[in-house]
Image (cartoon, rainbow, N blue to C red):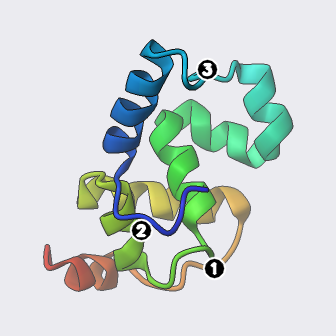
């Protein structure tokens, strides 16, 4: 799974590419239809705007304890994580648990 490791998305990609080069793993990019099927229209909207990074954050919401852990787990630029996090909540039409300013303060970028 995606959770339970300190490895960020770029590190995971490097490991998967290495394993794939040794025929020990299959590293396949999902096409748009597969993404829409797996993540629904909301997930597809997130993917269209933010690509894999958006989907990665989407999958982590509710799976990691805090917003700060999402940033740590993904290794994505904190300001971009804030932007994606806000977009995801807007797409899902759910109330944002933190304001942008609160997120920046938690991340030390206030």
Residue that numbered label 2 is attached to: 70
Q: In which quarter of the image is residue 43?
A: top right
Q: Relative to the observer, which residue lies in front, 100 or 11?
A: 11
Q: Which residue is drawn at 71% across and 66% down?
A: 93
- The vertical placement of 87 against 44, above or below, is below
Find disc 1 in the rendering and name its residue. 95
Numbered mark located on residue 1 in the image: none
Q: Name the residue under label 3.
A: 28
> Which quadrant of the structure image shows residue 40?
top right
> In this rendering, which labeled residue sits more in front, label 2 or label 1?
2
Residue that lies at the very extreme toward the left in this rendered image: 109
Query: Which residue is found at the position 53% from the left and 85% from the top?
Result: 97
Residue 17 falls left or right of residue 110: right
Q: Which residue is drawn at 53% across and 50% down?
A: 56
Mark 2 / mark 1, whichever is N-terminal: 2
> Which residue is drawn at the image coordinates 26% and 85% (left, top)?
106
The picture quadrant where one finds residue 46 is: top right
Q: Count neighbours of disc 2 (C-alpha within 10 A) and say few if under 14, some if 14 to 19, many if 20 or more.
A: many
Q: How far apart are marks 2 and 1 (CA)?
A: 18 Å
């Amino acid at each position: 799974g995606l959770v339970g490791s300190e490895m960020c998305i770029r590190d995971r990609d490097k490991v998967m590419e290495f394993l794939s080069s040794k025929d020990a793993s299959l590293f396949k990019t999902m096409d748009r239809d597969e993404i829409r099927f797996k993540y629904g229209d909301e997930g597809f909207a997130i993917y269209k705007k933010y690509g894999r990074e958006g989907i990665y954050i989407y999958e982590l919401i509710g799976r990691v304890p805090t917003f700060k852990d999402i940033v740590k787990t993904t290794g994505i630029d904190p300001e971009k994580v804030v932007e994606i996090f806000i977009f995801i909540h807007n797409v899902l039409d759910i109330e944002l648990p933190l304001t942008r300013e609160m997120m920046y303060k938690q991340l030390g970028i206030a």
